[in-house]
Image (cartoon, rainbow, N blue to C red):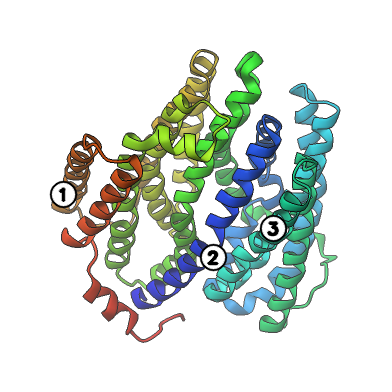
Amino acid sequence: MRGFFVRNILFVVLLNLLIKPLWIFMIDNTVQNRVGHDYGSYQALFNLGIIFQILLDFGITNFTSKSIAENPSAIRKLFPALLSARLLLGLVYIGIVFLIALALGYHGRELHLLAGISLIQLLNATLLFIRSNLAGLHKFKLDGILSVSDRLLMIIVCGFLLVAYRHQFTIEWFVIAQIICYGITVLLAFILLRKISRVPFTFSRNLKRIFWYMGKSLPFAMLIFLMSVYTRADMLLVERLSGDLGKQEASIYAAGFRLLDFFNMVGLMAAGMLLPIFGGMIARQERLQELIRLCVNILVPVSFLIVILSYFFNQPIMQMLYPALPSSKGNVLFWLCCAFPALSISNVYSTLLTANGNLKIMIRIAIVGVLINMGLNLFIIPTYYAEGAAIVACVTQTAVALGYLFFAKRELSLAKDMRWAFSFLYYLLLLGFIGLVISRLSIPWTVQFFIVLFAGLAMIFLMRFLDISSFQKLLNLKRQAK
């Protein structure tokens, strides 16, 4: 199973590293610089949509992936019923999001933007649902291709618009382009799933079955909603609580958060694969420790490397990527990157708890995360704006990750290995010392950056978190998808 996981995660990571950096740094970043502070409003509305995206998903994505992984033949009954449920939930979602937006004081052009953003979220949720069926069938490579197809189309469409209509480009064009590209990708995903599974693309009229499945998905829905609040509400709060600087501060926070999303890309992809894999391994009572150790050894040292790089080079990075924003706001990037190790730990251990069915525990942890995040943000953002929100994000994610780690070890009786745990701390301290020495050399910051980067990557192998020979053995293992 380790070999199967490694082969697929490497394929998906390489695919995403080819496409998503182009989207983030060439398209999304260029759009923000081109439309100015309108991007701050767009991102705040986008996050409002994400917070209530649970009304679109209702836990269906995770429930589908886990259920089909346990019983692939269930897809024929699940798909029509859950597709119908998603249609009903979409109508509810649009109504509630607009009511919340009106209550928050949005009007006019902002509501028009929200209409487009809501349609984007509806199409994205449908795509995720189709992909969850493919993941449940262990078609991870196809799932990976679909995960970047929408971005590839947007690179082509938005790239053309940004070049051909340089001075006329608006945030509305950006929204319309995403709607078109998501629509094409959803159609492609339907066709591929139909070809693989022969699943009937019909809506179920059996309301009893629809609501039964929605009831089964409810714990997943509650968990995802709470996680959305403590990870996405900060953007909305920054825009609403920063007074006259709301749009500017939201743009600054969006710039830093975009980079955090990029860094966390591998962890999220790993979590998507690990859910059905962990579910199958737990059902077969197989040993989990080896796969967990592999995932943590990949994700955590890399996250510490990002923390060190952001500490020494946050201001020049922000100035290079976002020349219109104050470079002094590099601290926002640093504090957001400090949340990255916690996110990496959460990606592994929260997925493990989900696969084990410990949703009540996870919901309680998520409630604590919401209370910490909302409580601190309401006091800190009016004074410290985007930087305050970034600090709160770091505190929240760290508290939540520790909760997931503690309960995963308790519920699954995972072995404690303090020597292994302290090796990560040693890596962080040693890399921090290297960064301190290199940052004092009289050479360009870009050269300093790459020296620290390569030193951090080399240390991952030198300290034997990973080694080339083990990867070669893993990649040669017989595929064990089922």
Image point (76%, 36%), residue name: 97
Query: Which residue occupies 52% across, 40% down?
Result: 321
* Residue 5 horizontal side relative to residue 115, left or right: left
Tell which tag, 2 or 1, sits nearer the viewer: 1
Q: Which residue is mark 3?
A: 154
Residue type, numbered disc 2 = Lys
The answer to whether residue 83 shows anywhere in this view is yes
User: Judging from the image, what secondary structure is the residue with disc 3 in?
Assistant: helix
Q: Is residue 26 left or right of residue 308?
A: right
Give the image location of residue 8, x and y in percent.
45, 73
Identity, as a three-letter code, of the amino acid under mark 3: Met
Residue 409 seen anywhere in this rendered image of the structure: no
Q: Quadrant of residue 412?
A: bottom left
Q: Residue furthest left?
A: 419
Q: Element type at marker 2?
A: helix
User: In 3D space, how far apart are the residues under numbered discs 2 and 1 (Cα atoms)?
Assistant: 32 Å
The residue identified by callout 2 is 66
> Left or right of 473: which side holds 232?
right
The N terminus lies in which quarter of the figure? bottom left
Residue labelled with disc 1? 418
| Comes first in the chain, label 2 or label 1 | 2
Report, in whole angstroms, how far the alpha carbon at label 3 lies from the one at label 2.
Answer: 30 Å
Q: CA distance from mark 1 to mark 3?
A: 46 Å
- Compared across the picture, whether 31 is left or right of 346 comes to right
